[in-house]
Image (tube, rainbow, N blue to C red):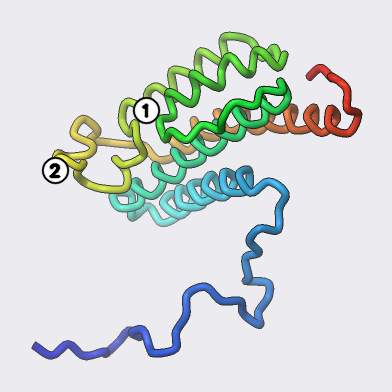
Amino acid sequence: MLIEEKDFLWPQKGDHLFVGGEDWYYNAVLNGQRDNLSLYAVGYKRAGEMLVEAVVKSRGDHDSLVFPIAFVYRQYLELRLKQLIRDSKRLLDDTSSFPTTHKIAELWKMCRPLLNQVGLNVGEQVLDAIEELIAEFAEIDEDSYAFRYPTDKKNSPSLPDLSCVNLPNLAEVIKKIANFFEAVSWQISVTLEQKQESGVDVEC
């Protein structure tokens, strides 16, 4: 059976994926930030926002874009939690290892007491609300596989109990969580910089 290139271009010898271009304003700069972990997190969150905006604008592609949307939002949560854990430990002079798990519920269990230990005093009510939301996400996608593959390693459906997701609502609730995480991350970062510059203990 002969398949011919007709209406769409196919790859050609000499094509490359990761190159810089003369149109520099389209070139993404990697490793130009002091904290790439934060940059990764922000990038995934922004990707989710842009995809939801596209769905709302076009009123289409809901059923296919739900998977990358949920995945990048989950990736944001995982990376931001890891950053909060890392920076809180630095502030507390805790030299224990960086968390490598992908389980966001476990990451939150590490993160929550650290936020209290660094003295942020944000209130238990908001922490309880975030814990419930992270637990909800973790119940659906514990290991960051469910929104990447239609079946798990045992060939069972990845999302057997999830039949409908309102994407604007998902985006709005993630935005609320992100508003909190960004504020906390900023405060910890500022306090950590002050401590490093002064060489003395400081309070948040």
- Decide: few, some or many residues near mark 1? Use Cα within 10 Å; few <14, some 14-19, many ≥20: some
- Decide: few, some or many residues near mark 2? Use Cα within 10 Å; few <14, some 14-19, many ≥20: few
Percent coordinates x, y for residue 121 in the rendering: 70, 12
Disc 2 marks a residue whose amino acid type is Asn
145 left or right of 49 in image = left
Residue located at (39% from left, 90% from top): 13
- CA gap, disc 1 to disc 2? 20 Å
> Seen from this angle, which residue lies furthest top?
124
Residue topped by disc 2: 155
Disc 1 marks a residue whose amino acid type is Ala
* Quadrant location of the N terminus in the rendered image: bottom left
122 left or right of 137 in image = right
What SS does tag 1 mark?
Answer: helix
Residue 169 in view (yes/no): no
* Quadrant location of the C terminus in the rendered image: top right
Q: Quadrant of residue 118?
A: top right
Residue located at (63% from left, 70% from top): 27
Residue topped by disc 1: 138
